[in-house]
Image (tube, rainbow, N blue to C red):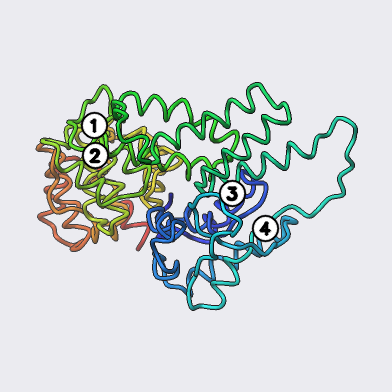
Amino acid sequence: MMDPADLSPDRLSALTEQLMLEQQGMDPLELLLASGALAYPDYEAWRMGRRPELQNALQLPVADVVALLRRAAAQASAFGLVAERTDRRRWGDAATDTAPEPLRIGADANLCRLLGSTFEPPPREQQLDLFYDSGAVAIEDSLRRALQARRLDDARAACGRLAERGEVGQTLADWLRLIAALDSVAGTDDDALTADPTPEERLDEVDALAPIAERRLGRSGARDMLALLWADLARLTAGQPFDPGQPRLHASWALARLGRWQEVRDAVEAEPDWPAQPKLLELHATACRHTGDPTAAMGDWFQLCWLHPEAAEATLGARDFPDAQLARCWSAFCDLDPPDDGPALETEDFPAWCLVTQPALAATAPAKPDGADPDRAAAYRAARTLAQAPDALDQRRALAAAHPTLLATLLQTRTRSG
């Protein structure tokens, strides 16, 4: 999931292309989820009928979302995909003769029109040969839709039809295993006397089911199904202390999979001395960014550099790093040539270097360099002050004393910009 604040036209184009490759089509709802314009907990609540409409859950103004979807629709059409009208219906309910009611998107007619279509490959004439069994394909398709919509009775009925046709082997075993997993978290009365699995058992189950779910349901369908298991894992790990050897057995991990970012932040902050753990710092930074606290997020990323430089190098260089501007800074920092004179710049110097080369970052940079050693703390404080008052000679002297290479960088940057 991206931060919608980072959704430039180029990033939107790349994200749309990625979704088209993964889905062999493009669902605008999936684009909103992947871009961060729609939070997964709000989407799930809407699909389950617990939220009356989708429009008021958007993380961006409606006009911006409409513009985003129009650009994506144009890109999908240019790739040869065709818009197909689709109903958005509520998840859940037992098997009945009546389809679940359509869901309300909102009052904006353009938003309703854009979210009321998916983009699919153009229809092709298909010739059925003697070895092509269209009946089994149709049953699996209905089974897939039933599981995606969390209608277990419908899924069991479809599995029964597959078995009646003599479909056995891995295909049927996969479907039965997915249904059994959902049954285990369905909370029916028959399950009331069944002991809870341990957190370790639930996590092992998630790991085992993830490739099966993706193979049978696709990436988005697997996400929607596994969300029920992640929620149960979050319940089972609530209050469990963080173990660096098993970081995914902390509630913050499962909550992050669900996009429940405020709860992630709360779970991390409940841990004593949580900045000492790089995994918790990373989760906390992402949670702060998604809950609208960029200063706290920046503080976490910088603290990761000062306290855990090796972890910071892996995190800042990851493809899915959530802060696009900081990712660009890190790429530029990694491309620096060694200085001709003065000490080399190391990962621990990256926070101060960011403020020297990108003074605008001072607006969201933390005031206190928590975790930095004395010299780097002094360099950071000087760099932060100089970002806001570039002619402060005493701060230039402080920066020179703490790290002369950073002062040289500052002077080169000011010369180029001047």
Q: Earlier in the sequence, mark 2 or mark 1?
A: 2
> In whole angstroms, how far apart are the C-alphas of marks 2 and 3?
29 Å
Q: Earlier in the sequence, mark 2 or mark 3?
A: 3
> In whole angstroms, how far apart are the C-alphas of marks 1 and 4?
44 Å
Residue at left 9%, top 37%? 374
Mark 4: give few (<14), some (14-19) or many (20+) Cα within 10 Å: many
Q: Nearer the viewer, mark 2 or mark 4?
A: 4
Amino acid, disc 2? Leu
Query: Is the residue 260 above or below the residue 334 in the image?
Result: below
Q: Specify the quadrant of the image occupied by residue 367.
A: bottom left
Q: Earlier in the sequence, mark 1 or mark 3?
A: 3
Query: Is the residue 113 above or below the residue 300 in the image?
Result: below
Q: Which residue is mark 1?
A: 308
Closest to the observer: 395 or 171? 171
Q: Specify the quadrant of the image occupied by residue 219.
A: top right
Mark 2: give few (<14), some (14-19) or many (20+) Cα within 10 Å: many
Label of residue 281 in the image:
2
Amino acid, disc 4? Phe
Q: Which residue is mark 4?
A: 119
